[in-house]
Amino acid sequence: MTQVIHFILSCLLVTVMALLVSHNRKLIKIRYIIQLLVIEVLLAWLFLRSDIGTGFTAQVSTVFNGLMLFAGEGTDFLFGGMQAQGLAFFFLNVLCPIIFISALIGIIQHINLLPVIIRVVGTVLSKVNGMGKLESFNAVSALLLGQSENFIVYKDVLGKMSENRIYTMAATAMSTVSVFMVGAYINMVDARYVVVSLILNMFSTFIVLSLINPYRVDLEEEVQMQDLHRGQSLFEMLGEYILAGFKVAVIIAAMLLGFIALIAAINALFSSLFGISFQGLLGYLLYPFAWVLGVPAHEAQQVGSIMATKIVANEFVAMTDLQQIKAALSPRAEGILSVFLISFANFTSVGIVAGAIKALNEEQGNVVSRFSLKLLYGSTLVSFLSAAVAGLVI
């Protein structure tokens, strides 16, 4: 009963906070929102509580663990026995496998399986969420291609999009997580929470965007994924995706280095001036939000602190903090926090998404930059809603 109460409180909080910034409440379609929420709760129960769902997540974990072993062969070749000795764990075990996963996605794209997946699943989702096909395609392509590479798919139609539609596309890219990153996340967070987050974030995105950014889609642009790499050989495709994976790994490493150092400096400053770290202060600010999600009161401050770290820095920094304290957390607190962390909703991602769009269409990139805070606000509500749904069934 307590879990149900916290879930209802969380849904009410998300609704109120979304409506505060909604640009046209008259266009909100309540039926689709209720429909999406019911489906999301059922899927959460399926993947976290049923034998079929837990078996599926275990299989996915096994597949990715196997892929990580293959990726480890390349890592060992370059770095000798460093991996076996546990040296440079994060770089070798978390970042390097991204390059291999990227290569696999390139192969799937080359055989034209990726466009089929995106088109079929996107069309089905558009019937469920009441949004346009383009927005539904985007939810799937962001999941499969990554938040920055994803926009290459839409380069020919970006200039025709309204500001509302651009917001939806950008918010979706920040609210979901890429298959590129699944192997990395599984090395840091319980695999079942990684898998369920892929699904929950997609549905939470549709719900939050239906509240914040409702609009009518009168004319939809067709997306021709098949033309994205026309004329490329398999090895050209592999080279492109391998380099893309390498760039993602290097960018993450640079961001982590900078943000961890910056947070350490800020924590030291706050500790010397106020006797409490910056993260500790943010933990108190987010304490009520963690409690509303269903985190036990005695753990809510610690959980709130890590939630804040994810928003201010990124999910990897926050996951590193989670690893350090998860032995002291209850399974419920760990599960809720894990689901909250698995998305790209942070300040860094705003810059990445705006930069990716600007590289393809400068005017639309400037539009994204103008509503960057609203973008972060919406994508954080998505993480909150996904964590609330997970908390209902954990």
Image: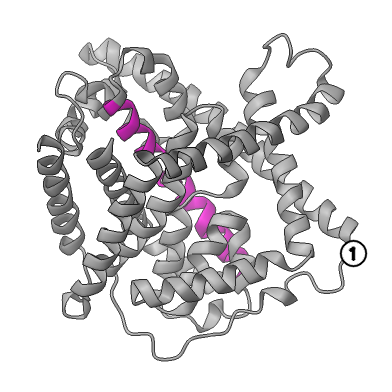
Q: Residues within 10 Å of mark 1 (few under 14, many from 20)?
A: few
Give the residue drawn at x 72%, y 8%: 85
Of residues 88 and 376, the one drawn nearer to the viewer in this rendering: 88
Measuring from the top left, give residue 363's x and y in whole percent.
52, 73
**Residue linked to disc 1:** 233
Report whether 356 appears left or right of 345. right
Residues shaded magenta = 332-361
The picture quadrant where one finds residue 301 is top left
Amino acid on which the number 1 mark rests in the picture: Ser
Classify residue 227 as left or right of residue 326. right
Q: Is residue 343 visible?
A: no
Towards the viewer: 164 or 264 = 164
Please tell me whether residue 337 belongs to the stretch shown in magenta: yes
Q: Residue at x 17, y 74 (%)?
A: 25
Residue at left offset 54%, top offset 80%: 159
Is 240 located above or below residue 320 in the figure? below
Residue 23 in sight from this viewpoint: yes
Q: Position of residue 290 (x, y in %)?
A: 21, 33
Query: What quarter of the picture does the C terminus occupy?
Result: top left
Name the secondary structure under disc 1.
loop
Q: Residue furthest bottom?
A: 218
**In the visual, does 67 lie left or right of 193?**
right
Q: Main secondary structure of the magenta part?
A: helix
Is residue 159 left or right of 307 when viewed as pictured?
Answer: right
Q: Is residue 234 above or below residue 82?
A: below
Identify whether 16 is placed above or below 99.
Answer: below
Residue 247 position within the rendered picture, expressed as x and y whole percent measured from the top left: 70, 44
